[in-house]
């Protein structure tokens, strides 16, 4: 069965694949004419390509044993809302035996090795008790799971056909351009091998499906059952794995998404070699660099990934990366947006030393970091350095930020539920219409740094804010600890 997720407004992303964007081309008379496109570049038929590729595309059939209760017939019905309604329901639920039923689901996949290795989506086989692979000639084989990766929604299966099977090869999705023709083949609605064609509508789409989102968007029609099927270029190479659609109804509306081959090929190779993925690990928690944060740091534009915290004894800490650094490039690859850094790090060879360029306190700093291996099963939280606790409470207000502050003592820790090892300046009040309230600060938050310098008293916070004002800064950067979670917040300085 396919899972639906709400995505922007009333539309849904459904694990499947296909997508398109309506493109309107407006040419003003003053613009230079576009170069002519040779008629031979537009295929008159996909028949030869389809004939070549269809034998390598398979149907995936899964069976899951589901436990359910067999409700007896003619059970007493209490009037809705009566005090006996819950009583009857609980009584019969307790005394009704469970029975098993078999639920089936259909998806798609494709053969990537003549020895019988088949690629599909993880969500197609995730809860399955039995998996069958059905070839184009309806020959059916039991499949075993070689490995799967929920973070990229990919899985690798193995069947034993006793002979070489027709396999397809990977293409270079990085070379695909918006407007290129593509062909999708799959098993929509369980009808068997079906072929649709369209164009690439967009690249590097982030649909919040996972940490490594980098989808190809296409308008080739893709419907329920196409999940795990291949997206081909006109050379018959796989450049994507169809995974999700954007749809209000569950059917194709011309907006579908495919995992690019640049990601899928590497993940599939690791699943085959190790039965799992091996990803690079840096050991930082990051956040987006907003325009306000960039201005408060003296950075020329909102780019890079802001390091909110560094994992103790992790690769970043060993490489001298600090909280408050903005990572601008990693291993020679620019980091234009925060979401690019996890993908770049994950792609990097484990154990290799790479160069990292960071923006720190108004200057560029070059570091060397040895990439570690990400533990997929464990989330390591960043630690907070401990320091002295101020026993004598001091209070103060920062009118330009709309904050009331106090130094920490045991009573305030208890009152606001502050962790025993956390340090900083406690927010005790927030002006309702002030700049701090606009950024979501609230009583109980801890301000650990102002302008990337540690603070332990309201007086220090006031001095840092005043220094920022003297430097004609329109905002000040705060490192805030909320229930152990660290984040940077750029707060506008109200000139009053």
Image: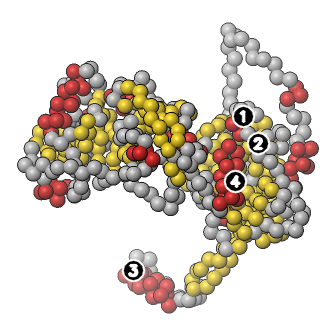
Give the answer, above or below, for where 359 lies relative to 275.
above
- Badge 3 or badge 4: first in the primary sequence: 3
Check disc 2 and report the residue beneath it: 171
- Badge 2 or badge 3: first in the primary sequence: 3
The answer to whether residue 173 of the structure is visible from this angle is yes
Quarter of the rendering occupied by the N terminus: bottom right
Check disc 4 and report the residue beneath it: 269
The disc at residue 31 is none
Q: CA distance from mark 4 to mark 1?
A: 20 Å
Identify the image's colour scheme: rainbow, by chain, secondary structure or one colour: secondary structure
The disc at residue 175 is 1
- Badge 2 or badge 4: first in the primary sequence: 2
Give the answer, above or below, for where 2 lies relative to 97.
above
Check disc 3 and report the residue beneath it: 82
Label 3 crowd (10 A; few <14 / some 14-19 / many >=20): few
Q: CA distance from mark 3 to mark 4?
A: 60 Å
Are the residues tagged 1 and 2 within 8 Å (C-beta)?
yes
């Amino acid at each position: 069965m396919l899972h639906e997720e709400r995505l922007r407004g009333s539309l849904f992303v459904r694990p499947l694949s296909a997508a398109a964007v309506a493109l309107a081309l407006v040419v003003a008379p003053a613009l230079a004419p576009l170069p002519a496109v040779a008629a031979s570049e537009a295929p008159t038929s996909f028949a030869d390509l389809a004939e070549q590729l269809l034998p390598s595309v398979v149907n995936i059939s899964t069976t899951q044993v589901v436990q359910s209760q067999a409700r007896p017939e003619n059970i007493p019905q209490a009037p809705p809302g009566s005090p006996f309604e819950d009583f009857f329901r609980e009584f019969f639920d307790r005394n009704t035996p469970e029975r098993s039923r078999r639920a089936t689901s259909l998806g798609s996949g494709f053969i990537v090795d003549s020895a019988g290795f088949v690629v599909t989506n993880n969500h197609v086989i995730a809860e399955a008790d039995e998996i069958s692979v059905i070839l184009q000639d309806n020959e059916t084989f039991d499949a075993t799971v070689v490995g799967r990766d929920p973070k990229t929604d990919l899985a690798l299966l193995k069947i034993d056909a006793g002979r070489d099977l027709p396999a397809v090869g990977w293409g270079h999705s990085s070379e695909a351009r918006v407007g290129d023709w593509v062909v999708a083949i799959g098993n929509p609605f369980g009808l068997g091998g079906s072929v649709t064609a369209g164009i690439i509508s967009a690249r590097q789409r982030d649909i919040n499906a996972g940490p490594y989102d980098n989808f190809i968007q296409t308008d080739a029609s893709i419907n329920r059952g196409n999940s795990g099927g291949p997206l081909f270029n006109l050379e018959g190479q796989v450049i994507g794995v169809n995974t999700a659609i954007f749809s209000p109804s569950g059917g194709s509306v011309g907006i579908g998404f495919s995992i690019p081959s640049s990601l899928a090929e590497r993940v599939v190779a690791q699943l085959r070699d190790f039965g799992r993925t091996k990803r690079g690990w840096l050991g930082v928690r990051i956040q987006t660099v907003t325009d306000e944060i960039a201005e408060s740091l003296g950075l020329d534009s909102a780019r890079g990934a802001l390091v909110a915290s560094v994992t103790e004894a992790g690769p970043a800490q060993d490489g001298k990366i600090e909280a408050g650094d903005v990572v601008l490039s990693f291993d020679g690859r620019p980091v234009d947006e925060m979401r690019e850094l996890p993908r770049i790090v994950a792609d990097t060879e484990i154990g290799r030393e790479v160069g990292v360029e960071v923006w720190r306190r108004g200057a560029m700093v070059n570091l060397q970091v040895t990439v570690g291996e990400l533990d997929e099963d464990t989330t390591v939280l960043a630690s907070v350095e401990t320091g002295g606790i101020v026993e004598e409470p001091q209070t103060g207000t920062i009118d330009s930020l709309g904050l009331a502050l106090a130094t920490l003592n045991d009573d305030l820790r208890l009152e606001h539920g502050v962790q025993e090892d956390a340090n900083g300046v406690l927010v005790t009040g927030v002006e309702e219409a002030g700049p701090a309230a606009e950024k979501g600060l609230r009583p109980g938050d801890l301000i650990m740094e102002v302008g990337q310098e540690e603070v332990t008293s309201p007086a220090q916070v006031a001095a840092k804010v005043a220094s920022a004002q003297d430097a004609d800064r329109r905002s000040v950067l705060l490192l805030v600890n909320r229930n152990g979670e660290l984040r940077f917040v750029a707060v506008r300085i109200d000139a009053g």
